[in-house]
Amino acid sequence: MSGHLAPAAIILLLFCVLADAGRELNFKAASLQADPAAPLVSLFRHPMLWIGLLLWAVEVVAWILALAKVPLTTAFPIMALTYAVTPLAARFALGERLGRSQKAGAALVALGVLVVSLNEVKA
């Protein structure tokens, strides 16, 4: 593994971050539609749950492919972008509110990922 990430590795890692966020949005959407009288049964009938599970499965494959190309010490911190992307996606896709501290936290996570992985992401 070289000292820099290849474009394919960057694409795989970004896909993993987006798939992770998409999975969580699908799980949340399914949970909002669950019948309180039979939550487990109704969840398994909801397509959003199955889409989330499919995203999870595809992400696992992409993650393994990414790890074949990228050191874990680089890949894992980049996955922390999920903690910034997911709340922002929930804001836009689900209309959830973000407080100032959540926005600041997302920005700090993104900045931290940039600092940790900056040397590896150079083309």
Image (tube, rainbow, N blue to C red):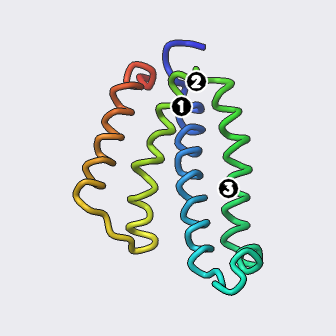
Q: Which mark is residue 72?
A: 2
Crowding at dot 2, Cα within 10 Å, few <14 / some 14-19 / many 20+, comes out as few
Q: Earlier in the sequence, mark 3 or mark 2?
A: 3
Q: Residue furthest front?
A: 37
- For disc 1, the marked residue is 76
Residue farthest to the left?
100
Tag 3's secondary structure? helix
The kind of residue on which mark 1 rests is Phe
Give the residue number, with chain letter if any, for mark 3. 55
- How far apart are labels 1 and 2 at the CA level? 6 Å
In terms of depth relative to the viewer, which is nearer, 61 or 77? 77
Mark 1 vs 2: CB contact within 8 A:
yes
Determine whether 90 is above or below 39 in the image. above
Q: Secondary structure at mark 1?
A: helix
For the residues labelled 3 and 1, the Cα–Cα distance comes to 18 Å
When the figure is inspected, residue 70 is found, relative to residue 113, above or below; the finding is above
Query: Where residue 109 sits in the image (x, y, percent)?
Result: 35, 40
> Quadrant location of residue 47?
bottom right
Q: Is residue 31 left or right of residue 61?
A: left
Along the line of sight, the residue nearer the viewer: 9 or 18: 18
Q: Secondary structure at mark 2?
A: helix
Q: Report the mark closest to the observer, 3 or 1.
A: 1
